[in-house]
């Protein structure tokens, strides 16, 4: 008997904002058949049968591709609904065919294009994945000469974000809308690993469109979406960041297209709430930060980032703010919204206070007393000053600072992680002063963090015994390679958004120029190796989509900086008030002994 699961029936791409969607939500078991129905202009349509199989081989979402019903669906391009049955579809398929059969042997002028941007756009379009004839994502890497694709032929949720943003900035909204709605279907999947099911609300790390024989008809095939929640991933890592990125992209879609009907849909609202419930669930934790296993984000293999890694905390904060903007105010969600607001305040106090280091803070840690048993301890986490690594004493500039990688009892991970720091600027988790200081540090440590290719994923690399113990002697994560101090061109777009937010775009422009010198010539690698990013990564995939999309987003935003608003969160006055009163009532986080627990009600 297969496991039971809660399955929202939520389908359909190409719904107009005026459409009303019927929505089923219940406990189901074994093979289920759902029919999505759409009420439009008083008429009910049944579209795309969706079969959901639980357990065993057949756990796939199925949707007919032959006689596909969606081929004549409306399309939303440049904010205009076009009912013409997608005249561009054939052309797109043709381009896809051409791309698949021509290969990408030329370093420049692929498809006869003249500029780097044209080449990048052609490559990005060539990486598009179609489901029932509609674009729903981009594959991770598109190098026809590579026989060892592993799972790089799948659509990764986190990898699609820069692709999605590039399409949004170009006014091509359909692919993003489809991606959002189809990944939502996968969220409520019955997912198991060795008899254990993770929490409902988890979004997959990636998915693949497969063509399989149609049930009961050997002469026909259908397309299915096949998700991976980590149960097949190397190391079986849980993609904690996927749901957070999904919320961030959903908000960006609404802000950019002006089409708020997607975020207002009942199934989308339910999806947001499921992610939040999973993240806000009570556990054993004493900290407001999200507790995760190693490899639960962009760094998706063992790198010693288990616990409370900064990247997850920044994305978590960002997703909470985005969800707060999008959740419909209704009685039933009042508790969830209250929990969300409380968490936002606690999380920002915690990160700004305890993750921040600069020269002053480092000196404070250097002089810490330890073993303080009291509510008023200064060294709350019992950090032994000897933990300050020798490299940091030399490396920390007089001007500048950053948020450390992780904080646990008696443990500070002093490594600099780029994505977590940049996203903390973007979502306002870092204060204004801290945000400037992070950019100051990037500028003053340019030769370490940018060098020959922006941007180092983290600094410094783990070496020797540390590498052996922390990575488990991972031959892919050797010092200054891949996740262990490798340089990832995709991070260019996050750097650009952060610089634009702080009104310092010249830093990003300088980085873009460095990337432009070689990124196309090197065939858009996934990452670079060595301290100075001199080599193309040992096992780097070429024509890596998020390297291409990251470059395009950076260029588009530099040309139109105000568009960065679709990603940025600004200081919320209400939150700021609660934040300052919480801090003044509770200087340096001392425990409040009197009065009820502070709660923040909007
Ligand atoms: C690697 C990266 C991960 C990315 C995936 C697909 O596993 O670590 O962040 O999503 O490749 O590009």
Image: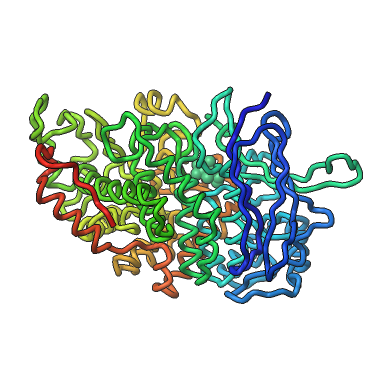
Residue 207 position, x and y percent, is: 63, 44
Q: Quadrant of residue 27?
A: top right
Q: In which quarter of the image is the C terminus?
A: bottom left
Q: In screen coordinates, is 597 left or right of 27?
A: left
Placement of 82 over or under 57, stated as above or below = below
| Residue 61 at least partly seen | yes
Q: In screen coordinates, is 156 left or right of 126?
A: left
Q: In screen coordinates, is 190 left or right of 533?
A: right
Question: Which residue reaches farthest right?
Answer: 219
The coloring applied to the image is rainbow
Identify which residue, 231 or 20, lies in the foreground: 20
Residue 145 position, x and y percent, is: 70, 47
Identify the residue at image location x=48%, y=45%: 274
Placement of 79 over or under 544, stated as above or below = below
Placement of 581 over or under 277, stated as above or below = below
Identify which residue, 563 or 264, lies in the foreground: 264
Identify which residue, 288 or 564, lies in the foreground: 288
Identify which residue, 390 or 589, lies in the foreground: 589
| Residue 232 at least partly seen | no
Q: Quadrant of residue 400?
A: bottom left
Q: Quadrant of the N terminus?
A: top right
Residue 176 position, x and y percent, is: 58, 61
Identify the residue at image location x=63%, y=48%: 9
Q: In which quarter of the image is residue 514?
A: bottom left
Identify the residue at image location x=64%, y=38%: 150
Q: In screen coordinates, is 359 left or right of 2?
A: left
Total label count?
0
Residue 394 position, x and y percent, is: 20, 42
């Amino acid at each position: 008997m297969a496991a039971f699961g809660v399955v929202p029936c939520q389908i359909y791409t190409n719904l107009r904002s005026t459409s009303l969607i019927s929505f089923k939500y219940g406990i189901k078991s074994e093979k289920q058949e759902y029919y999505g129905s759409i009420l439009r202009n008083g008429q009910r349509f049944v579209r795309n049968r969706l079969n959901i199989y639980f357990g065993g081989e057949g756990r796939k979402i199925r949707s007919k591709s032959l006689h596909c019903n969606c081929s004549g669906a409306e399309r939303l391009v440049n904010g205009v609904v076009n009912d013409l049955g997608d005249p561009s579809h054939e052309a797109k398929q043709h381009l896809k065919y051409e791309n698949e059969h021509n290969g990408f042997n030329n370093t420049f002028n692929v498809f006869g294009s003249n500029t780097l941007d044209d080449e990048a756009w052609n490559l990005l379009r060539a990486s598009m994945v179609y489901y029932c004839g509609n674009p729903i994502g981009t594959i991770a890497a598109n190098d026809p000469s590579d026989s060892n694709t592993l799972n790089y032929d799948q659509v990764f949720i986190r990898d699609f974000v820069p692709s999605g943003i590039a399409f949004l900035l170009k006014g091509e909204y359909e692919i993003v809308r489809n991606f959002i709605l189809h990944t939502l279907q996968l969220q409520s999947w019955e997912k198991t690993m060795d008899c254990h099911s993770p929490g409902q609300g988890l979004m997959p790390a990636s998915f693949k469109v497969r063509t399989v024989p149609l049930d009961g008809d050997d002469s026909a095939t259908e397309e299915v979406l096949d998700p991976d929640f980590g149960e097949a991933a190397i190391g079986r890592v849980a993609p904690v960041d996927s749901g957070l990125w999904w919320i961030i992209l959903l908000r960006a879609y609404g802000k950019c297209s002006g089409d708020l009907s997607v975020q207002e849909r009942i199934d989308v609202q339910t999806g947001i709430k499921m992610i939040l419930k999973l993240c806000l669930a009570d556990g054993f934790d004493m900290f407001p930060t999200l507790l995760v296993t190693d490899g639960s984000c962009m760094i998706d293999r063992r790198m010693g980032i288990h616990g409370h890694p900064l990247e997850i905390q920044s994305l978590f904060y960002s997703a909470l703010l985005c969800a707060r903007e999008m959740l419909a105010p209704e009685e039933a969600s009042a508790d969830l919204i209250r929990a969300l607001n409380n968490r936002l305040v606690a999380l920002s106090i915690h990160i700004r206070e305890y993750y921040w280091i600069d020269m002053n803070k480092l000196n404070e840690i250097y002089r810490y007393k330890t073993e303080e048993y009291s509510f008023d301890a200064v060294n709350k986490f019992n950090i032994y000053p000897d933990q300050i690594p020798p490299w940091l004493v030399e490396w920390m500039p007089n001007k500048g600072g950053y948020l450390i990688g992780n904080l646990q009892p008696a443990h500070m991970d002093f490594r600099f992680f780029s994505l977590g720091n940049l996203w903390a600027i973007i979502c306002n988790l870092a204060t204004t002063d801290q945000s400037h200081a992070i950019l100051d540090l990037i500028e003053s440590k340019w030769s370490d963090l940018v060098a020959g290719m922006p941007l180092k994923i983290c600094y410094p690399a783990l070496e020797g015994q540390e590498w052996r113990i922390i990575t488990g002697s991972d031959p892919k994560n050797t010092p200054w390679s891949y996740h262990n101090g490798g340089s990832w061109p995709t991070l260019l777009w996050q750097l650009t958004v952060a610089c634009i937010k702080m009104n310092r775009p010249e830093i990003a422009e300088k980085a873009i120029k460095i990337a432009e010198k070689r990124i196309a010539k090197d065939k858009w690698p996934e990452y670079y190796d060595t301290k100075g990013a001199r080599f193309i990564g040992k096992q780097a995939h070429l024509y890596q989509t998020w390297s291409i999309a990251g470059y395009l987003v950076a260029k588009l935003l530099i040309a139109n900086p105000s568009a960065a608003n679709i990603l940025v969160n600004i200081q919320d006055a209400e939150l700021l008030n609660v934040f300052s009163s919480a801090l003044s009532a509770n200087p340096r986080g001392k425990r409040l002994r009197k009065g009820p627990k502070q709660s923040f009600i909007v």
